[in-house]
Image (spheres, helix red, strand yellow):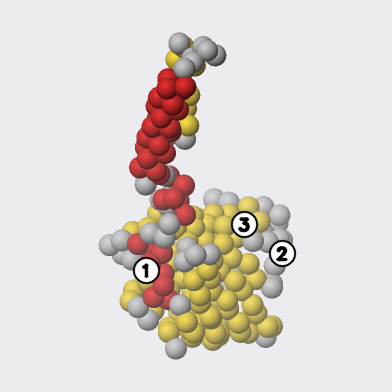
Amino acid sequence: MTRHSKRVGNSFVLLIYWPLKIENKTMKQLTLLIASFFILSQVTSQDAGSNDPWMAYMTPAPFHKMLEKYTGEWKMDVSMWMEGAGEPMKSTMKSTHAMISNGLFLEMNQLGDMMGTAFTARITIGYNNSSKEVELTSYTNMGSGMTFLRGKWDESKKAADLKGQLTDPVSGKAINIRQVVSFPDATTMLIENFDQSGTGPEKKTMEFRCTKS
């Protein structure tokens, strides 16, 4: 008789190899023994699955549950600061929010007018259970690039400080961008945009104040 162990899932199964000449009674005992080991391995594997990192990665966390409060129809007051301008340009838009992908992301579809031009944008906000960071993607009909930002969530401030980069279409150089996304209460959401070029100072460029309709 020889014995070997083999990994199955998260457990080891003992494999027993007997000579070919085996009595029927002994064969039944052997079959029962192997079946017992197989059942044990399945139970062990299922228990380990309860701590499966992939399950944790794909399961909505408390942050995702919080995002559910911000679904529905929203009024969005937009302020935009142009280079060298003291007072911001202001406009009003509509934004429709919905949870997507099994409740893992809040999708914001914005529609309105900006500088006399029809404006559409789509923003997606989520929380990466693996990296423990808030992540945001956005794109609009006013540019062929997409924005990706990520950063830490501050529970005490109910805000996330997100950072990333985009390419300046004029200079072709990278611009450091930062967004502070905050949730003051169940009917208010605020997104503040800041840009920083080269070694220059950071400047606030836009503010989106969303109020639930």
Q: Where is residue 58 in the image (x, y as percent from the top left)?
A: 47, 54
* Closer to viewer: mark 1 or mark 3: 1
The residue identified by callout 1 is: 66
Q: State the CA–CA distance, disc 1 to disc 3.
A: 29 Å
Q: Which residue lies furthest to the bottom in this view?
A: 213
Does any portion of residue 153 appear in the rendered image? yes
Kind of residue at disc 3: Leu
Q: How many marks?
A: 3
**Which label's residue is closer to the chain start, 1 or 3?**
1
Q: Residue 144 carries which label?
A: 2
Name which residue lies at 59% across and 65% down: 138
Closer-to-camera residue (195/210): 210
The residue identified by callout 3 is: 166
Quadrant position of the C terminus in the picture: bottom left
Kind of residue at disc 2: Ser
Name which residue lies at 37% across and 40% down: 43
Residue 190: name its quadrant.
Answer: bottom left
Residue 114: name its quadrant.
Answer: bottom right
* Label 2: element kind: loop
Q: State the CA–CA distance, disc 2 to disc 3.
A: 11 Å
| C-beta proximity under 8 Å, tags 2 and 3 | no
Quadrant position of the N terminus in the picture: top left
**Which label's residue is closer to the chain start, 1 or 2?**
1
Name which residue lies at 49% across and 65% down: 102
**Which label's residue is closer to the chain start, 2 or 3?**
2
Q: Position of residue 34 (x, y in %)?
A: 43, 27
Check the image and report above or below for 113 versus 194.
below
Question: Neighbour class for label 3 at 10 Å: few (<14), some, many (≥20)?
Answer: some
The answer to whether residue 120 is left or right of residue 153 is right
* Label 1: element kind: helix
